[in-house]
Image (cartoon, rainbow, N blue to C red):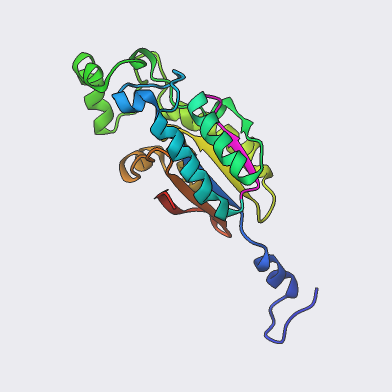
Amino acid sequence: MSTTAGGESTDSRAAEAVPPRRIIVLRHGQTTFNAAGIWQGRLDAPLSDLGRQQAQEAAAALTAYGIDVIYTSDLSRALDTARALGAAVGIDPVCDARLREIDVGEWAGMTTTEVTEQFPDEQAAITAGDDLRRGRTGESVAHVATRVDAFIEDVVSTLPPGATMAVVSHGVTGRALAAQLVGMQQGVAWHCLGGLFNCHWAQLVEHRSGWRIEGWNADR
């Protein structure tokens, strides 16, 4: 190993010259259920006309990030968004069911007004910070964190140095993934990070000390 006149190793300088790994966490475009204020969870609502337009616009903007690989939830709203991005950058998306949205149990297909009226105690508890199973039979955020943690272990850990991965997912799942990656407690992320808007994204960049969120709710 050689050193510079200042005592810094050339190997160290070469390591610093390698671009960091990056992950773009993109939420899907607007769906017909989003527009109607209906809880989706695992229901496979399609993109609305606006959602398809949003997907095309996000894809055009994200070409500047030099994306090398795309992983996506297999629910159609995410997959169709990922396909728009894949067409723009020349990459076929890879589906992974662990990127699906939180299961909202009995609330799936209900409007926000109906959920609030029929489950006021549960809604109040979640608003206060309690991590309950959504819709009694669905998932908690902790459940989502467990499956995205497995995705990080199996997929993100294999991302080569300098590569950029796009992950197309959902509002709750995307935030849970970002929090797990940077080591943020899920409760803190729930209160401190606003939800990702349709076809907005987070940029996470790896540094020597670990992953950092360097952009949140970007759209250009």
Answer with the quarter of the image where residue 40 lies.
top left
Q: Nearer the viewer, residue 103 or 87?
A: 87
Q: Is 128 placed above or below 67 here?
A: above
Image quarter in which the N terminus is found: bottom right
Residue 206's x, y, as percent?
57, 55
Kindly identify the residue that appears in the image at 48 percent across and 28 percent down: 77
Residue at left 35%, top 20%? Answer: 134
The x and y percentages for residue 42 are 45, 19
| Residue at (59, 38) in percent of width and height | 152
Compared with 191, 35 (above or below) is above
**In which image quadrant can residue 46 be found?**
top left
Q: How many marks?
A: 0
Q: Which residues are magenta?
A: 67-75
> Looking at the picture, does residue 212 appear above or below residue 84?
below
**Residue 175 falls in which quadrant of the image?**
top left
Horizontal arrangement in the rendering, residue 4 relative to residue 187 (left or right): right
Tell me if residue 68 is in the magenta stretch: yes
Residue 60, image x, y percentages = 52, 48
In reply to whether residue 52 is colored magenta, the answer given is no
Q: Position of residue 52 (x, y in %)?
A: 46, 33
Q: Please name whichever residue, 158 or 199, is drawn nearer the observer in this view of the structure.
A: 199
Q: Is residue 162 left or right of residue 102?
A: right
